[in-house]
Amino acid sequence: MQKIMTKDEYRKYVDKKYPDSKVFRNIVRAFLVGGLICTVGQFFSNMFRLKGYSTEITGSLTAIVMIFIGVLLTGLNLYDDLGRFAGAGSLVPITGFANSIVSPAMEYKSEGYILGIGARMFLIAGPVLVYGISVSIVVGIIYYILRF
């Protein structure tokens, strides 16, 4: 027969088993790494503007470079370490989205190009893409209807 714990005994048990939360440390890390990623993006944006590209082209080129950096770091197995260190600071920028697409593709490459990489590449990012595209279509339809 099991011993029934009192509320105080249970609270002590939970406190002993529950890991200490390091919220402040995690916030600082996320802020610093996320800020660093955004600073790198701003650097490339400024460089493209100095080269004379328009605002639209600069935004596209900056996004392409940041996605490439995210894919490169994922391919070199560095982005996972960055994610463990920074948490959401590395996941929220566009580099984190690139990582979420490339990681499953790398994980399943042993299953082949079609059934492995092709079928599993959008495993994590797929729902985000479907939701984003679906919402943009609905908003576009509403905008089109209200415009008249």
Image: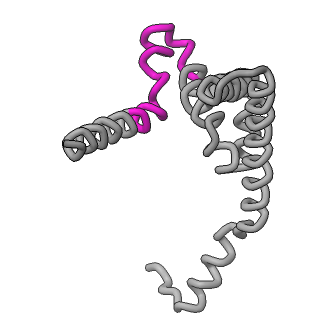
Query: In the displayed structure, would residue 74 be above or below residue 135?
Result: above
* Residue 30 shown left or right of residue 92 in the figure: right
Quadrant in the picture for residue 19: bottom right
Q: Main secondary structure of the magenta part?
A: helix
The residue at the point 53 percent across, 90 percent down is: 7
Location of the C terminus (image quadrant): top left
The residue at the point 56 percent across, 12 percent down is: 110
Magenta span includes 102: no
Quadrant in the picture for residue 56: top right
Magenta span includes 118: yes
Location of the N terminus (image quadrant): bottom left
Query: In the displayed structure, would residue 83 be above or below residue 125?
Result: below
Q: Which residues are magenta?
A: 107-129
Query: In the displayed structure, would residue 30 be above or below residue 74?
Result: below
Quadrant in the picture for residue 93: top right
Query: What is the count of numbered marks?
Result: 0
* Residue 66 shown left or right of residue 116 in the figure: right
The residue at the point 76 percent across, 48 percent down is: 35
Q: Say if residue 49 shows up in the picture.
A: yes
Q: Say if residue 67 shows up in the picture.
A: no
